[in-house]
Amino acid sequence: MEITCINCPVGCLLQVEMAGGKVLSVSGQVCKRGEIYAHQECVNPTRMITAVVPVAGSQMPLSVKTEQPIPKQDINKCMAELAAVQVEAPVRMGEVIIRNVCDSGVNIIATKEIARTV
Ligand code: SF4
């Protein structure tokens, strides 16, 4: 299969040979990060999630992110939990907004401060 390395703007096109769910070889990468990415992406793909959620007590939305990447297959469940979340100002940067999102073991955290303004 062919995948594009997303670790830097070069965007190397990687050729990945697989058998039995395992990576046999990777070619096309300029650096070692491409090989590592190909193994992860083809065996257990993960993504960082970023989003904004409304905040009661503020006219500004709150930007949030996962503390670590979560399995790609859990993205829709994660977004559904984010769509239902209720946040109230004030919010501290780094505050946990959702603990253990979609049973991934990863928290959703605030990426900025929000003061109460209304
Ligand atoms: S393989 Fe290395 S140079 Fe190529 S896109 Fe990935 S990180 Fe960038």
Image (cartoon, rainbow, N blue to C red):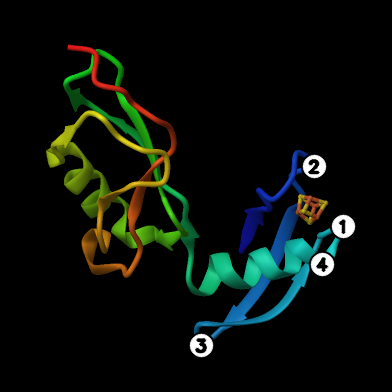
Residue at point 23%, 68% (across, down): 103
In the picture, the quarter occupied by the N terminus is: bottom right
Residue 32 bears which disc, if any? 4
Dot 3 corresponds to which residue? 20
From mark 1 to mark 4, how far is it between C-alphas? Answer: 7 Å
Indicate the amino acid at tag 1: Val
Among numbered discs 4 and 2, the one appearing first in the sequence: 2
Dot 2 corresponds to which residue? 10
Element under disc 2: loop
Residue at point 15%, 41% (across, down): 85
Residue at point 62%, 73% (across, down): 39
Q: Are marks 1 and 2 in contact (CB under 8 Å)?
A: yes
Residue 30 bears which disc, if any? 1
From mark 2 to mark 3, how far is it between C-alphas? Answer: 30 Å
Indicate the amino acid at tag 2: Val
Q: Residues within 10 Å of mark 3 (few under 14, many from 20)?
A: few
From mark 1 to mark 2, how far is it between C-alphas? Answer: 9 Å
Q: Residues within 10 Å of mark 4 (few under 14, many from 20)?
A: few
Between label 2 and label 3, give the one nearer the viewer: 2
Q: Say if disc 1 is inside 8 Å of ligand 1.
A: yes
Q: Residues within 10 Å of mark 1 (few under 14, many from 20)?
A: some
Above or below, 1 relative to 18:
above
Q: Say if disc 2 is inside 8 Å of ligand 1.
A: yes
Figure quadrant of residue 105: bottom left
Indicate the amino acid at tag 3: Gly
Among numbered discs 2 and 3, the one appearing first in the sequence: 2
Above or below, 69 relative to 6:
below
Element under disc 4: helix
Q: Position of residue 97 (x, y in %)?
A: 26, 47
In the picture, the quarter occupied by the C terminus is: top left
